[in-house]
Amino acid sequence: MLFFLMTTALIGFPSLSNAHGDNDSLLRLVEVRDFLGGQGWFDLHQYRMGPEGGFVMHWSRLVDAPIAAIILAASAFGASESTAEILAGSIWPLLLYFACIFILIRAARFYGGAGAVLPAIVIGGTALYFIGTFSPNSFDHHNVQLTLACGALYLAMIAPGKSRAAIGSGICAALMLAVGMETTPYVATLGLTLTVMFLIDGDHERPIARNFGLGFAGTSALVFILTVPTSSWGTGDARCDAFSSFQFTLAVLAGGGLATLCSLEMLSGTIWRRSISIVCMAITLGAVMLVFFPQCLAAPYGDLDPRLREFWFAHITEARSLWQLLADDWISVAGRYATPAAALILMALRRRRDDWRREDTLVAALLIVAFVVSAWQVRGSPFSIAFAVIPLSAWIGVWRQHAQKHPSGLASLRMAAAWIISFNFSWTVAAAAAVSIEDRMEPQLDAASAASCDGRQQFLRLATEPATTVLAVSNLGSPIVMYTDHRALASLYHRNVVGNLLALDAFLGSEADAKAIIKANRVGIVALCPGNAETKLLATRAPDGFLASLIKGQPPTWLEPIPETAGEPLELYRVKSG
């Protein structure tokens, strides 16, 4: 952890002043500011995004609370608001980074013995560092989810000797689900794996499955009470993309049902009784979903407007698939997929031997699912990379011990090869061929930030304007609400359907279309970032549209250019009254 802190300090803490395009971290801090400013615990509206009245975000207050606590603690010692936020931006990701590595070390030691500890520290620490999930100012919830996922796996692994650890595993699983629905595949896989283990080996797995179910159901009920207002407890207010009555109902039925059948001999005394009970429970869950929550059976973004799918969702980096990355970003493929693939190969080879263990089943199940998810959407790759650390560390540990017992040049070479193969960064370097540490330094980060307008510096002039609604591409929504007092009409969030469609219609439409939208939504400023990728995309798709005319330097007469921003990365136009 201290090495991570020192490395970040040496390059000048770039992320503490600029998020460099991490819209989620920016908006999370805005959400924390609003909460500390008096916005209610149950009120998740983002009032300064979208049309007037804003929209309700799908995030959880469970992540806002500890960040807010750090800011309050720093403020209590006399720190200013900005200093307190900087401290939170360093402390919060660092604590999660430490916790995640600590868990991976314990898991690797349990899985591969003492020889796996050093490899887990080294390859685990570097892997988590280079995926960027724990970088300074990472207020996004993905680092929380990754830490909880590793915790749930580790506690499930050690449960045979400490059955109460299964309660902790269930708690972690429920919190993963409460923080964000992206972790549903991992929660379902862990629960299903423990259930199958109980089905096969009822005597030994009974207390583990029971305690996991109790922890999962109990925590889900507590989270529901703490984060969902009573006015939304009905099935009619269920949200498929955030923790609501839908997730609560299924979690309590699944967890409570598993704990019940594990506790009653008449339901689980034999493998046939367990089979019948589990099938009945599955049918019940399916029926409840079909009858009360049929809307959640559809694809997550199945009803997304085709225009948003084409111009927005298809270009979100974390939503890209492995096949898309193979076409144009094979360096990322090497860094994100090579070590999980190596771990899967190792586990497949181990499966052919007779020493397959319970912990192998748990690690393999989650690693396979995480790899499949990452092939579908790249956002799953941090999970597969983290899970891969466990078998890879054990593999290195075996060759370390072999090299110690039978020292030779060949043994040392094999051990070195195991180390190199297990580093995700070594695959990135090999793929890039010319990448060096200097390529990641601050000056180039600043240049890229300036071109795409995602740094604080580009919004200083906009912040001096009286608060109004700003029309800009969706990539600039989070920086606008973070660095200024303005409202952003468009943003990178699927619930802001109205605002995003209005922005698209304005930018892709004619001058008359844009004027009508701007007037109807009381837009006061139009912000243009010619270097932004989204701006270039929209201008290319509509070369005669309103946005393209701005890029050509042909603003309509009802827009007044703000002189100080001419030629700057972010050009501003004030809407004339009347």
Image (cartoon, rainbow, N blue to C red):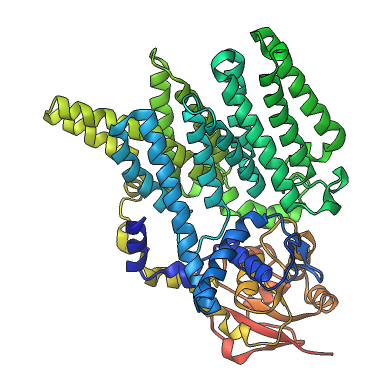
* Residue 571 or residue 80, whichever sits in front: 80
Q: Quadrant of the N terminus?
A: bottom left
Q: Position of 237 compared to 167: left or right?
A: right
Q: Position of residue 369 (x, y in %)?
A: 55, 32
Position of 309 relative to 355 (above/below) = below
Q: In what quadrant of the picture does the C terminus appear?
A: bottom right
In the picture provided, is 101 more to the left or to the right than 269? left
Q: Residue furthest left?
A: 408
Task: Determine the image quadrant of residue 204.
Answer: top right
Q: In this rendered view, identify the residue nearer to me: 36 or 137.
A: 36
Q: Quadrant of residue 526?
A: bottom right
Whether residue 342 is visible to the viewer of this picture, yes or no, is no
Looking at the image, residue 78 lies above or below residue 314: below
Vertical placement of residue 249 versus 457, above or below: above
- The residue located at (81%, 46%) in the rendering is 238
Q: How many marks?
A: 0
294 or 258, which is in the foreground? 258
Position of residue 468 measured from the top left corner of the image (x, y, whole percent): 74, 81
Could you tell me residue 116's position as x and y percent? Answer: 31, 34
Residue 559 visible to an observer of this rendering: yes
Task: Give the residue displayed 41% in from the left and 46% down from the top.
Answer: 101
Q: Please, is residue 517 above or below residue 467 in the view?
A: above
Looking at the picture, how far across and down is residue 49, in whole percent?
Answer: 73, 68
Task: Judge left or right: residue 26 versus residue 418.
Answer: right
- In the image, what residue occupies the spot 69% across and 47% down? 223
